[in-house]
Amino acid sequence: MYAIVEIAGQQFKVAKDQKVFVNRLAVEEGKKVSFDNVLLIGDGNKVTVGAPAINGAQVGAKVVQHLKGDKVIVFKKKRRKGYRVKNGHRQSLSEIIIESIVATGAKPVSAKVKTDKPVKKAAPKKPAVTKTKAAVATKAAAPKAPTAKKAPVKKATPTQDLSKSTVAQLKEVAKTKGIKGISSMKKADLIKALSK
């Protein structure tokens, strides 16, 4: 007896006591799992085909182990462009052993898994507030709160160490002192001119 069953999005032809490597299943090792999406069952000369699945048919299996498949090298290249990318991939697999194939009378596996925690519903979204012309006008007419003023730029004074000041600070001090030609001066020239 054999069956064609869909497991984790792929179709497999399976028989009793057969080992099958399928995409990773969210089941612990050693646990039993059953698949009720059986597409075809063959028993000798008798073949039963579902439309698309057979009602009441089920394949039972046991998860032996979780493992990774062989490494696959993914190499991409575009000639004459200097584009080369090399990646590796190892598919996550589960090894299962088919324990039973039931043609009729099996209970369907429930798709939803019950959880102990109650499901929280999303809070309803608040409608967007539209501003009227009057509301915008009152907001514009309202007095503005005093804003914090920016700290003034520290100006280098002769008492300070001029070498620790930035070029911008030195140029500000040079402007206030009336020194000309500061736009082309470097920091050392500015310090020399201010120290006179």
Image (cartoon, helix red, strand yellow):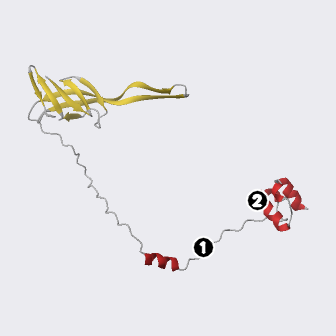
Tag 1 near tag 2, CB within 8 Å: no
Q: Which amino acid type corresponds to the residue marked 2 in the rendered image?
A: Ala
Q: Is residue 166 visible?
A: no
Does residue 45 appear to the left or right of 97 in the view shown?
left
Does residue 123 appear to the left or right of 88 in the view shown?
left
* Quarter residue 30 falls in: top left
Q: Position of residue 139 (x, y in %)?
A: 49, 77
Residue of label 1: 147
Residue at x 80% of width, y 61% of height? 171
Secondary element at image label 2:
helix
Residue at x 85% of width, y 67% of height? 177
Does residue 119 appear to the left or right of 134 in the view shown?
left
Residue of label 2: 168
Q: Quadrant location of the C terminus?
A: bottom right
Q: Residues within 10 Å of mark 1 (few under 14, many from 20)?
A: few
Q: Is residue 67 visible?
A: yes
* Quarter residue 13 falls in: top left
